[in-house]
Image: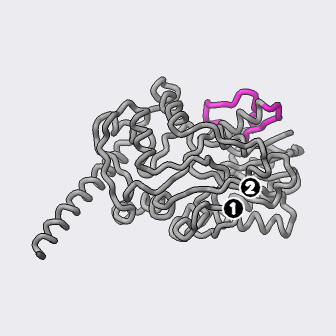
Amino acid sequence: MRILFIGGTGNISEAVSKLVVSKGHELFLLNRGLTQHTISGAQIIQADIHSFSSVEASIKQMSFDVVADFIAFTPDDVKRDIQLFQKITKQYVFVSSAVVYEKNRILTPIRECSPHANPNWDYAVKKIECERILMNAWENEHFPVTIVRPSHTYDKMIPVAIGKGYDLIDRMRKGNRVIIHDSGNNLWTMTHSSDFAKGFVGLLGNPVTIGEAFHITSDEHLSWNQIYRIIADAAGVSDFDAVHIPGEFIQRLEPEWGPTITCDKGFSAIFDNSKIKRYVPSFECTIPFYEGFRNTLSRYDNGELSKEIDSAVSHKLDNIIQTWIEFVNQAEAAYRLMK
């Protein structure tokens, strides 16, 4: 197959690109050519996806069996894609997100048909609207869309609930406190990108997937307390100082950080993967989190991935922790005075 990826070298998409090439497909990656990171065997189409005329000129007289957009997340993005690819692809894959599910009201396991609503997080609102636009295009214009919803997928990134990736490792190794939201007992699903890729690639070029949506996740479920324990073990930290802080409290202090917890990671996320397994019978996740994360961290420790520390983020984390401790102490003191 001739396959075009918008993106293709990111945390989720790199493993997909490598698997596509390994299966002998002809892969094109559309990007601005600003990164030195490449996928062996893939051809580069240099263009800015946000410039309609640039992309249109770059793909003139080309056609594809599959076009997949890993970076679209606004309604304008998918409207542009419909215009660009309507006549030149047999299948368009939109990489949405499991944030579209109404996790605060859904009984697990989550299915593709579970209610979609997440009105307090702009990222989720935009993904939901993108899906609506694309499904309307399928129903009214026969635009050949397949929707894929990853959940928390990792490989080149360190999965965290709050803050930035390597900052967590740095804090643990230095003995600094780390935040775990709420009680840390809600169950979460971590999926390695290599496992995700098997399901994703299995959908490509399959006409019966047109007009359908699929989430692709692991069947392993861990609490956030367990996740951070596994991360600490991989980092060689036998004992780390965790402070449990309510997600609502974090949102009051840092409104930009809050929704990732109060609208997503603060709820349990267990998925029913029976649909992807029906359409891709060979799909099976085989990388447990403890194994996959050790591999991820080794890539940082051996210099393959950059150990970027964001001092501003670390400062915010320190401030949240200190404010929470002071709040609890003051509340306890006030309560004692009431007795």
**Residues rendered magenta in the picture:** 23-44
- Residue 240 placement (x, y as % from top left): 31, 40
Q: Is the residue 312 above or below the residue 335 in the image?
A: above
- Residue 80 placement (x, y as % from top left): 74, 58
Q: Earlier in the sequence, mark 1 or mark 2?
A: 1
Magenta stretch encompasses residue 293: no
In the rendered view, does 147 fall on the left or right side of 192? Answer: right
Image quadrant holding the C terminus, namely bottom left
The Cα atoms of the two marked residues, 1 and 2, are separated by: 8 Å
Name the foreground residue: 26 vs 336. Answer: 336
Q: Determine contact: label 1, label 2, CB under 8 Å.
A: yes
Residue 239 badge: none
In the rendered view, does 81 fall on the left or right side of 237? Answer: right
Q: Amino acid at mark 1?
A: Glu
Q: Is residue 148 visible?
A: no
Displayed quadrant of residue 74 = bottom right
Q: Is the residue 216 above or below the residue 22 in the image?
A: below
**Which residue is labeled 1 in the image?**
112
What residue appears at the point 51 percent right and 69 percent down from the top-left corner? 120
